[in-house]
Amino acid sequence: QVQLQESGPGLVKPSGTLSLTCAVSGGSISSSNWWSWVRQPPGKGLEWIGEIYHSGSTNYNPSLKSRVTISVDKSKNQFSLKLSSVTAADTAVYYCARVPTAAGVGNWFDPWGQGTLVTVSS
Amino acid sequence: DIQMTQSPSSLSASVGDRVTITCRASQSISSYLNWYQQKPGKAPKLLIYAASSLQSGVPSRFSGSGSGTDFTLTISSLQPEDFATYYCQQSYSSDTFGQGTKLEIK
């Protein structure tokens, strides 16, 4: 079964760039799925960040679009997130997830990685 | 943006109770609605997709219904492991989540 694992620095300085990688195992990132990032500030709800297809096509949350870049590395079976100009408001647990899609009924997130806490602080 | 509003925000119930959580979309989203369960310190887990389809491996006491703007998640007989926070999510346009419903033990 497909498993996802996030990795990256747990502490980022304000105005810096947050960089995370999601390694996919048990399946190919080139399968017919999108791959997504979702975040959750401590004690708060979930926010979709964006998604990528193995072709490199992307979709981003309009509220974050100017600061987000998601890329894919098919040779390593992984995808990555970069979020620039971070502030304390970007402190959150960041999850990666597979995004199965079905015509006429939309898409959902399954499975999810375990999540990684990124704190923005000097 | 499509806004998703869940009610109630929190709920106290007992083992064996039947529980219903509601999710309302700010515009019609057809059946593009999913439900997740999240326990403290864990990633969300998919329960229901496409409004009413039960994800493989999820107990049959969970069910979903609705279309358009109004949706419900029902747990027919609460079990101890069901106490968690539940989120709805729409995928009709630029995925968004509800604010969550925390289900606590009475």
Image (cartoon, coloured by chain):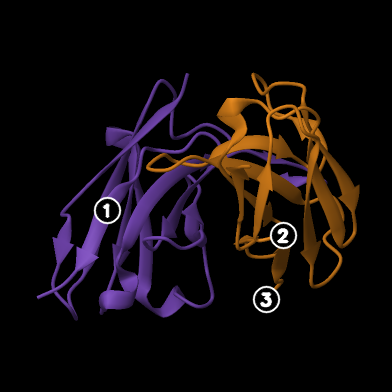
Tell me which chain the residue with mark 1 is part of.
A
Q: Which residue is drawn at 27% across and 47% down?
A: A21
Contact? badges 1 and 2 (CB < 8 Å): no
Q: Which residue is drawn at 70% across and 30% down?
A: B78
Estimate the x, y position of residue A73 in percent, counting from the top left: 31, 43
Q: Which residue is drawn at 15% across and 54% down?
A: A9
Q: Is residue A97 visible?
A: yes
- Name the residue tied to disc 3: B1
Q: Distance between the residues labelled 3 and 2?
A: 22 Å
Direction left: furthest residue: A122
Left or right: where B7 falls relative to A104? left
Estimate the x, y position of residue A42 in percent, counting from the top left: 36, 61
For the C terminus of chain A, give its image quadrant. Answer: bottom left
Estimate the x, y position of residue A2 in percent, counting from the top left: 45, 25
Task: Give the chain letter for orange.
Answer: B
Between circles 3 and 2, the one closer to the viewer is 2
- At label 2, which amino acid type do we have? Pro
Q: Going from the N terminus, do you reach mark 3 or mark 2 first? A: 3
In the rendering, what colour is chain A?
A: purple
- Name the residue tied to disc 2: B8
- Name the residue tied to disc 1: A117
Left or right: where A25 falls relative to A106? left
